[in-house]
Image: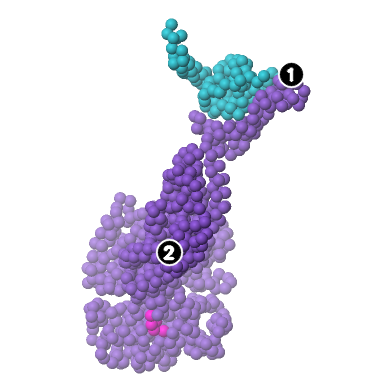
Amino acid sequence: MIWLRRLLLWLPGRRRARALELQEELRANLSLAIQDAAESGLSPEEASRQGHRDFGSLTRAEEESRSVWFPGWDTLSQDVRFALRTLAKTPGFTTVAILSLALGTGAATALFSLVDTVVIKPLTYREPGRLVFVREVVPPLAHIYPTLPVNFQHFKFWREQARSFEGLAAIENGSATMDSGGEPEVVGGAYVSSNLFTLLGVEPQIGRTFQPDEDQPASPDVAVITDGLWRRKFGGSRDVAGQTLRLDGKPYVVIGVLPLSFRFPKKEDLGPLAHLSERSEFFLPLKQANSDGWGGDYDYIVFGRLRRDLTAAGGAAELNLIEQRIAAEHHLNRDLHIKMWPLQEVMGSPVRTSLTVLLAAVLLLVLIVCVNLANLLLARSHARAREFSLRIALGASRGRLLLSAMVETLILAVAGGVLGVLAAQAALNAFVHWGPVDLPRLDEVRVDGRVLAFAFVVSMLCGVLFGLLPALRLSRADPQNALRAGTHTISGSRHGLQLREWLVGAEVSLSTLLLVLAGLLLNSLWHVLRVDRGFAAEQALEVRVSLPSRYQSVEQKAEFFDQAAGRLRSIPGVRAAAASSRVPLTGESNVNHVILDGSDDGALDPVTKQLVMVNVRFVGPEYFSALGIPLLRGRAIESADRDRNVVVVSARLTAKLWPGQNPLGKMITCGSGVSRAEVVGVVGDVHSTQLERDPTLMIYAPFWKRAFQVSGLVVRSSAGSGLAADVRRAIQSIDPGIPAPRMRTMGDLVSESVAGRRFQMEVAMAFALSALLLAALGIYGVVAYGITLRRRELGIRMALGARAASVRRMVVRQGLRPVAVGLVVGMLAAVAAGQLIRTLLFGVSATDQWTFAAIASVLGLVAVLACLFPAHAAARIDPAGVLRED
Amino acid sequence: MKPSRVEFLQGTLDMLVLRTLALGPLHGYGVAQAIRRSTGEAIQVEAGSLYPALQRLELQGLVTAKWDVSERNQRTRIYRLTAAGRKRLQAEVSRWEDFVRAVSLVLHPKTIED
C-alpha cells in the first residue's frame, strides 16, 4: 500500500506538486507560530525570530520529507553527483571508457538490427511457417546444379495430383519496357499463377488480386502492381484500378495494388538458374509456358502452402512419388525427385554465414571492450583504494560503497550506450549505402524499439560486467590501509597485478583471433583479384539495350544490333564493338549438354563420366577482341558467318570433348540453339560466373539467328568519360523509341563480383583493427600503471646502479609476458575458428602460415610499442627524487 | 529559561502524533503545540521531525489530510486520524506500555514487586 502511494508520487507532475504543497503547508504553519509569538507581546521582529526558532528548520523539514517519499533518492543523487565529479576529474579515462563502450555497443547494436531484419523478423506473409519453396533434382545434372527450378509440365501435374498442399504456384521472370508516356523504361516483373497471392496470404491495399480463372489463355490481360510502381507511375492515385499499363506495347488493365509491406523473394535467394528481376514491380497471370516438354526447361520458381495438418516431410514425400510417375510415364529414364525448403529459411539464407561471422566478430569486440574497461577500472580502483579505505574506516557500509562504485560504471555504460546507438544509426546508414547489394530486405533495416532494447541490455551488461569486478575489490578495501601514511604504501598486491595481466592476455588473444580471421579474408580477396579472369576488363564497356516490342522478328533485332555495333565503332576512340547476349561475370545462361556426331546422348566428361554442360553465348564479330579474350586456334566469328553454322569454343571444352585432337572442323550440337555447327576457332577460358569458380565451358555462336529482345553490346575504347553520352546518342540515333541503354564498365563488373567479399573483409578488418587498438591501450595502461606502482622499487634499483637501458628492458620484458601468452592462445583459437570460416576463404588454407606469421609480427610490434612508452618513462625516474619522497 | 528537551526513540514520535490526533483533527503546528503543552514543554517537536513523520503517516494511510481554514483564519492542512490509524495507535500504546513496564522492572525491582 505504502509502495503504491510512493509509486504514484513518481507520476509526472505529482512530485513537484507534492513538494509545492508541502512548502505552502510549512509556510502556513510557520505564520501560525509567529502569530502565537506576537500574541505573547513581542515586537514584530522578535516575534518572527521567536516563531522561527520554535518552529524549527524549514529546509530540514523539506529534505526529510523528500526522503520519506523517495527513500534512497538523496544518497543515490549524491552518488551520481560524486561519480560525475570524479569522472570529470579524469577526462582521459572517461573519454577512453565512453568511446570504447560506444564502439562495443554501437557495433553490437548495428549488427543486431541487421540480423534482426534479415534473418529473425518473420515474412509479411500469412502463416509463413506453412509456405515452402520447391526445386527439382535431375541426377545427370546434379554434379553442376544440385537442384534446378521446376519444369512447367511437372508443376501442372503436381497441382493436379498432390493432396498435401492447399495450393502450389509457379513464377516466371518477365521484364518489359513500359511506355505509358514519357521516357520508355524497363521494369522488372513476373508472370505468376493466379493463386499466388491467395497462397501467400497477401491482401491488396487497393482493388483485388487475380481470380482463379485469370490465368486461362482466353481471359483478359490484367496486372497487379506493387506499391512502389503505383506511386511512381500513377502518383499514388486511389482510382488506379481500371487504368492501363502498357508493357512491351501491350495494354494491361491494373486490377490491384499490393501493400507497401509486400516483399517478393530475390533471385539470389532461389538458387542457381532461377531467373527473376532485381525487383519485381508488376505481376501478370502466367497463362502458358513457353515450352510444353516434359524434360528440360527447368525454369519455373514454385512455392507451395502445406495443408495445416501436414508436415513438410509429408509434402515432400508425396511430390517425390509423383515425380517417379512423371519419370516413368514420360520415359524420362531418370531418377527424378524434388527438394523442398521452408520459404522463411530461403529468404535471407545466402547471407547467413557472413552474418554469423560478423556476429561472432562483434561479440569478440564487445568482450574485448569489457575486458579493457575492467582493466582500466581495476588500475583506477587501486588509485582510489585509499579513498575507499578511508570511507570504510569512517563507517560507510560495504554495500553502500559497492553501490557508489557501480554508479560510476553505470553512468559510463549509459553514456557509452547512447553514443553507441547514435554510432549504430550512422553505421547502418553507411551500410545500407555502401554495403553489398545482395543483402535481402536491407532497405527495411532501421533502429526500432527492439534494437534500442537490445542496445540498452548490451550496454548495461557491459557496465555490470566490467564494473562489478573492480567494484567488488574496492568495497573489500582494508580500512587499515588508509590509516597508514604515505601513498606509496597503497600499492597493488601481487594478486592484483596478476589479475590485470590475465586480462591483458585475454584481450591480446581475442585480438589475435580477430586479426587472423581478418587476415585470412584479406588474403582470400587478394587471391580472388589475382585470378586470371580470361578477359581484359580495362577499357571495356557493357551496353545493355532493351528493344521495344515493335521489334518482333529475329531479323529485325539482328539488323538493329548490327547497325548499333557499326555506329559504336564510328565513335572516336572506340577500337572494337560487338553484339553479345551476355558478358562475363553476369551469371550463367543458356546452359545445356552437348551432342557430338555419332551419338544421340550428351557427351560425357572423360574423367567424371558425367554430362558435359556448357553455356552458350551469341556474339557478333569483334566480340573477342572487344573483351580481350585470346584466340588460341582457328578464327573468330566473322560477318560472313551470318548464315553459316559455325561456333567458337573455349579451351577447356576442347580438352574435355576432344582430348589430344584438333578441334577445328569437329561438329557439335547443343540444345540452346546450336544445331550441328562446325568448330572454327578456340578461345581462352573466361570466368563467367564468379572469379572464385572455375571458368565455365563455353560455346560462342553467331548472334544473327538468336538476337534477343534484351541484349548487350561490348565496346572497347580508349575514349574517356564522354563515351557514355556518345554511346547513348549512337543507339538512339537508330531508333529514338529505345529506352536509354544501361552501361557498366567491365571493371565495375569485376569489383561488383567481389563486392560482397571485399565488404566482408573490410568489416572484419575494421573489427580487427579496433581490437588491436583496444589491446594496445590495454597493454599500455597496465604497464604504465605497473610503473607508477613500482616507482619506488625502480628508483632504488637505479640508485643502486641499474642502467636506464636495463630498466627499459625489464619493463618491456615484463609487459610482454602476458602478450606472449595471449598471442599463443589466440593463434590456437584462430586455428579452430578458421575451420568455421573455411567456406569464405579462397586460395588460402585456414591455417595459412604466412597470415599467422604476419599477424604475430604486427601484434608483437604493437605490443612492444605499447610497452616502450611507459618503459621510457620508467628509465627517466629520478632516483634521488624518489628516495626523498618519504 | 529554555526548557530541557527529551531525546526520544525512533517511532515514539509517530505514536505521539497519532495520540494527539486521536483527540481531534489538527494542523501540523497544532500537533507540535499540543505535544509541547501536554509534556510540560519537555518535548519540543522540530519541524524537521514533525512534517516527515506526518508525511510518513499519511503515506501509510494512518492519517488523512485536507486543506481547510484553521481557527485563526489561516488556510492550512488539517490532519485527521483514520480507522487504521486508530488501530495502529492502540497497538503502539500497548507495545510502549509493555516496554515501559519491562524497563521499570529493571530499574526499580522492588516497587513493582508489591
Say which chain tag 1 marks. A
Chain represented in purple: A
Same subunit, labels 2 and 1: the answer reads: yes
The residue sitting at 54% across, 89% down in the picture is A573
Horizontal side of residue A38 vs A312, given as left or right: right
Q: Could you give the CA–CA distance between mark 2 and mark 1, rounded to whole angstroms?
A: 82 Å
Which one is in front, A220 or A497? Answer: A497
Residue A463 picture location, percent across and down: 46, 51
Magenta highlight range: A531-535
Q: Of the residues shown, which amino acid type is indicated by label 1?
A: Glu
Q: Of the residues shown, which amino acid type is indicated by label 2?
A: Val
**Visual hue assigned to chain B:** cyan
**Which of the labelled discs sits on residue B24, or is there none?**
none
Residue A666 picture location, percent across and down: 29, 90
Residue placed under numbered mark 2 in the picture: A811
Q: Residues within 10 Å of mark 2 (few under 14, many from 20)?
A: many
Residue placed under numbered mark 1 in the picture: A39
Return the residue found at the far front.
Answer: A800
Mark 2 and mark 1 lie on one chain; the one further toward the N terminus is 1
The residue sitting at 44% across, 65% down in the picture is A801
Secondary structure found at label 2: helix
Horizontal side of residue A19 vs A334, given as left or right: right
Residue A693, picture quadrant: bottom left
The residue sitting at 33% across, 73% down in the picture is A849
- Above or below, comparing residue A563 to residue B26 in the picture: below
